[in-house]
Image: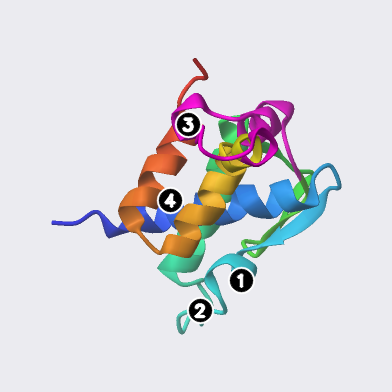
Amino acid sequence: MADLHIEDFYQDVAGILLGLYNSFPRPTTLFVSDLVGELEPDAFGVPAPRHLACFSAMLWLADEGFLRYTEAIRQEAIDQCCLTERAFVRLATPVKAFHDDALPPSIARQRATLAQQLRDARASQSSTHLANVVQHCFQSPA
C-alpha cells in the first residue's frame, strides 16, 4: 500500500519551505489554503483531514527547527513565520550531489541549492524526485 499521506507531507514541506524562502528574511503569514487549496470543513466545522495534515506539517517543521512563528491563527495559518538560520543555510547552500560541472559556475551553484532542487522537483510532478529532495533537506549536512 502506498503511503499517500507521506507524499502529501513532502508536497506540503516543499511548499512551506519554498514559500518562506521566497519571502526570506521578511516574516509572513503562511496560510494552509495557499498550499492545499480551499477545502470544506465537515458538517461540524472540523477542517478536512488534508487541511489538518498540512497545518500539522507547519507545526512539525517549527518543532524540528526549520521555521519559527509568533502564533497560530486557528488551524488556518501561522503568523509572522520565517525560516530559521539553519533552514535558510540548508536551502541556500549548494549540495555537491546536485552540482553539474557542465554548467557555468554561477548557474551550477544556484541549480545545486536545495531551494532550486525543490522547485525543480515540484515542477517535474515526480513524487519520487520530490521525496528524495525533501529527505535531503532533513539530512544533516556533510
Please tell me how many numbered marks the rendered image carries.
Answer: 4
Q: Which residue is mark 2?
A: 41
Task: Measure how far apart labels 3 and 2 are at the Cα level.
Answer: 31 Å
Residue bearing the label numbered 4: 10
Residue at 48 percent across and 31 percent down: it is: 138
- The residue under the point 56% across, 37% down is 112
Counting other residues with Cα less than 10 Å from the Cα at mark 1, is it few (<14), some (14-19), or many (20 or more)? some
First-in-chain label (2 vs 1): 1
* Secondary structure of residue under mark 1: helix
Q: Looking at the image, can residue 121 be seen?
A: yes
Secondary structure at badge 2 equals: loop
Amino acid type shown at disc 1 = Ser
The residue mark sitting in front, 4 or 2, is 4
Residue 130 appears left or right of 120: left
Q: Is residue 61 above or below residue 43?
A: above
| Percent x, y of residue 13 | 52, 49
Q: Callout 2: 10 Å neighbours few (<14), some, many (20+)?
A: few
